Image (cartoon, rainbow, N blue to C red):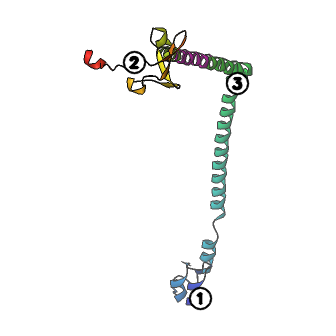
Amino acid sequence: MARAIYASEIPVISAVGHEPDVTISDFVADLRAATPSNAAELAVEDQSTVRATITDRNSCLLHSIEKRLELLKKTVSSAAEKRVLTNPRAYFDDKRMQVEFLSRRMNSAADNLLSMKRGSFVGSAAALDAMSPLKVIARGYLIATEDEKIIKSVEDVSIGDPVSLRLWDGRIDCVVSDVKREDIHEKG
């Protein structure tokens, strides 16, 4: 019997006999009562205690609900006072002004970038124009070619070779009659 009480998953109260009596079940039971009447009292909570617990929990629940409702009322009241709800047109006016401001900033930035790029382009075009072979020719220089290849040295031609001279306003075709080498680096 003691082993069955010990192994039981259901709580067991040992209440055999009267106070001075002790049984083996008293040592293995979940709870020991002095008498069977006392065991019944221990097994069932007092009705007034249960009612007090229910009343206390009910009071806590009501208090919690009231606090939650109060918080929700404040949230709704705060939202109702927002400008977007009191004057929806103002909200759209604010957004329109924001868009206009950003648009002006973007246009200004685009104009600045365009101006900067235009200045860079003009500078690059001027530098390129200054290095143009046509500009060099216009200052009195010429370009000598033989068979459409630019002549860079006297060693590139021989006496009797046909040569074309490109000037700023046209071309002169000639034949090489003499070739003289000068070392311009030694003269300078």
Start-end of magenta stretch: 104-118
The numbered disc on residue 4 is 1
Q: Residues within 10 Å of mark 3 (few under 14, many from 20)?
A: some
139 and 31: which is toward the camera: 139
Judged by depth in the image, the label closer to the viewer, 3 or 2, is 2
User: In the structure shown, which secondary structural element does the residue marked by tag 2 occupy?
Assistant: loop
Decide which of tag 3 and tag 1 comes sooner along the chain: 1
Per the model, the C-alpha gap separating discs 3 and 1 is: 73 Å
Disc 2: which residue: 178
Does residue 125 sit above or below 63 in this rendering?
Answer: above
> Which of the two discs, 3 and 1, sits closer to the camera?
3
Q: Residues within 10 Å of mark 1 (few under 14, many from 20)?
A: few
- Quarter of the picture containing the C terminus is top left
Disc tally is: 3
Q: Secondary structure at mark 1?
A: helix
Task: Look at discs 1 and 2 and give the one toward the viewer.
Answer: 2
Query: Residue placed at 67% from the left, 51% from the top?
Result: 58
- Point 50% across, 84% down: residue: 27
Circle 3 residue: 84
Quadrant placement of the N terminus: bottom right
Identify which residue is drawn at 63% across, 65% down.
Answer: 46
Residue 176 appears at what percent x and percent y? 44, 19
